[in-house]
Amino acid sequence: MKTTTLLVAVCLALPLAAVEVDLAKAVVVTARGASKREMKAASVLVEEVERRTGIRWKTAQSAPDAGAAVVIGSKAEVDGLLKAAVPAAPGAEGYSTGLKSGKVFVAGADERGVLFGVGHLLRNLEMKKGRVTLRDDYQAASAPESKLRGHQLGYRPKTNSYDGWDVAQWGQYIRDLAIFGTNAIELIPPRSDDDKDSPHFPRPQMEMMIEMSRIADDYGLDVWIWYPAMDDDYSDPKTVEFALAEWGAVFAKLPRVDAVLVPAGDPGHTPAPILMPFLEKQAANLKKYHPKAQLWLAPQGFDSKSVEFFFAEMAKRPAWLSGITYGPQVRVSLPELRKRLPKEIPIRHYPDITHSRQAQYPVPDWDVAWALTSSREPINPRPVDEAKIFHAQQKHTIGFISYSEGCNDDVNKIVWSGLGWDSKRPVVEWLREFGRYFIGAEMADDFGQGLLGLERNWRGAAQTNQDVEITLAQFQAMERRATPQQLLNWRFQQALYRAYYDAYVQRRLKHEMAVEDRAMDTLRRGMATDTVGAMSAAGRVLDESGTRVAEDLRVRVYQLAEALYQSIRMQLAVKPYIAQPGRGNTLDTLDVPLNQRGWLKEEFARIGKLDTERERRTALARIANWSDPGPGGFYDDLGNAARQPHLAPGAGMETDPQFFATPVNFFNPNQKGPRSWWDQAMALYEYPLELNYEGLDARARYKVRVVYAAGPVRMEAEGVEIHGYVEKPWEVLEFDVPESATADGKLTVKWNRPPGVGGPGRGCQLAEIWLMKK
């Protein structure tokens, strides 16, 4: 009796497990007076459930007394249809959703709230073929934190995917983004810094721009235009007249325009004193066609003089300007921009989520093997990095519309939209919802964790990163149990492509570096007695670099590239997919050399022409001991995180994600010179590169041997100029260090580029440095 009583007590104390509510025969209910956009939200729900389950829900304008129903509308409409009060949404664009009297409800604060509430419901439904259920404890009440949550969608050639999309694909993608809380898109006009046409265009650019504006308006989303001012001279009245007519013709054709963003640079080159009067005229021009539309300016590319003029004009609070956008190539940090602008002028963030190098927010300490193969625009899920960038920058802005050049950054878009809605929610939960909604409920966590694994692949040294093989194994396990529909899913294909790609590159890297090590051992053993024979033997070993490894992985990469072209028109190679070079065509760089065999063979050919054995032996010794700084010396391979111990680390990505006060990696994709030249450390704008040494011999004299990758650059040691601005990239240069600079056994050496220059802020780039005793 006591045992039974105890069991009953324990059972009563345990929380009841949630029960799945069967919604297979549910009816979607909207009020008779529902708006077009509320009805659009209902259509989204019906169509997306049918897409995943094959079940087509019926619609009605009154809730049934018995049976399952999903009631959608404003709070007042839902209250009336259910004949009972439901919780109110907590703010603009928000919603409350849950179950009431056995019925599922979505009550929006406004039309967007209804759409976003439907999105939340869709992300939480359990959907399989022939089955749709919902936990009986489902409920939520939420409103977005960020006012603006958008993404640039450029129908133009350089995107290497978007240019192949038809209207239906754009409609689906915009819907997908809205389901995760996106409330704005940004379009690009027919004339920009791009080719006039693409062989992939299913429609002319202007026609597609009109369609995309219409699609966004159907959902009630804001439409922005990124409109670069690219003409030669806006001080010329005829140029201004032409531009007003050209821009006006675009504005007149679009069904919806809420704002226009004009970047001052990238592209563009007009100084602020000339650009701003022109934009005042364009603001008036815009309002002729869209009276409520706003004009925003991004001070990108300005040099220091234009920046100061810009701030002086902003202090006057120009009435024609609605706000400022912070994007790439703005020479002040976002916190400084916010501090110097009048508080009533809003700032919109324009974060680059699409590029992995030569970028506003590059991958930190990226290994050169990834940089050369994956290049600038790979498939790049970076959820942890994107969250760090968001949390560091977003507090200074009203929100964001991301800088995107294709669907390669699809995961990053969802992360930004999710954090824009709820910044406190762990990013892994947004990834699980990504996996749940786009791939399938049974893979929700596995896929989300796999995306985190792809980001970990790019951490640390590519050659030794054990996560690469683990991530591949995880995705192969998902691939084996995937349904035919999931294998055709382009988001699944993208993740598989990256997993196989990374594993193949790593295995090839290990092979090629082992070959190079054997070749150098062969050279060192033989050059003491026979330099010509040693070079010949080392060259034969180097030829083994081209031996194919992991051919099964390589074949699968090619298969997935074809699948991605068929599913989403992703152009991963110039041939056969007619991609633009350097724009995500990662299949073309899959097999680029990862060891320095090309440079070694060039050097062998040069040295072989020297007259004497002694000359050849001296030259070969330099190669064989390239990084040796000699007794009591120091060496740094800048750009290689594992071999730059003396580089001052700066602020770090956590607080400085744009690397304004932190050295950042830069790369030489042409693979000029030895491997140590393929990556460099770079400082932006006026920030100096700094190397610090301790434990020096105070009685010794030192010299610096250095290789610059760009210029002009200036060098100083302990405040004493070693040389003025020079531009001698890819030369091995040597300079004496003043004896006084090392008298205390320490040394600080700094390099900087000329102050005040605009553009991307590059120029101070160092490939490698030796500090050597004389």
Image (cartoon, rainbow, N blue to C red):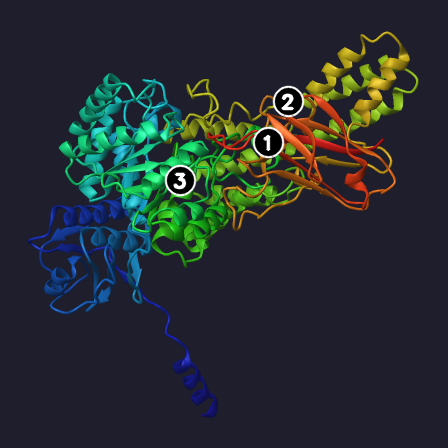
- Report the quarter where the N terminus lies: bottom left
- Report the quarter where the C terminus lies: top right
The quadrant holding residue 716 is top right
| Whether residue 488 can be seen here | no
Q: Which mark is residue 410?
A: 3
Q: Nearer the viewer, residue 537 or 93?
A: 93
Q: Amino acid at mark 1?
A: Cys
SS for callout 3? helix
- Whether residue 82 is situated above or below residue 182 in the rendered picture: below
- Whether residue 742 is situated above or below residue 423 in the rendered picture: above
Q: Amino acid at mark 3?
A: Asp
- Whether residue 563 is situated above or below residue 144 in the rendered picture: above
Q: Is residue 8 left or right of residue 75?
A: right
Q: Is residue 262 left or right of residue 562?
A: left
The quadrant holding residue 136 is bottom left
Q: Could you tell me if the residues under marks 1 and 2 are in contact, i.e. CB atoms within 8 Å?
A: no
**CA distance for labels 3 and 1:** 33 Å
**In the image as oriented, which residue stretches furthest toward the left?**
32
Which of label 3 and label 1 is nearer to you? 1
Q: Earlier in the sequence, mark 3 or mark 2?
A: 3
Badge 2 crowding class, 10 Å Cα cut-off, few under 14, some 14 to 19, many 20 or more, is some
Q: Quickly name the residue at label 1.
A: 764
Q: Quickly name the residue at label 2.
A: 729
SS for callout 2? loop
SS for callout 1? strand
Q: Is residue 542 left or right of residue 52?
A: right
State the image coordinates of residue 75 (x, y, percent, origin top left): 16, 62
Which of label 3 and label 2 is nearer to you? 2
Q: Amino acid at mark 2?
A: Pro
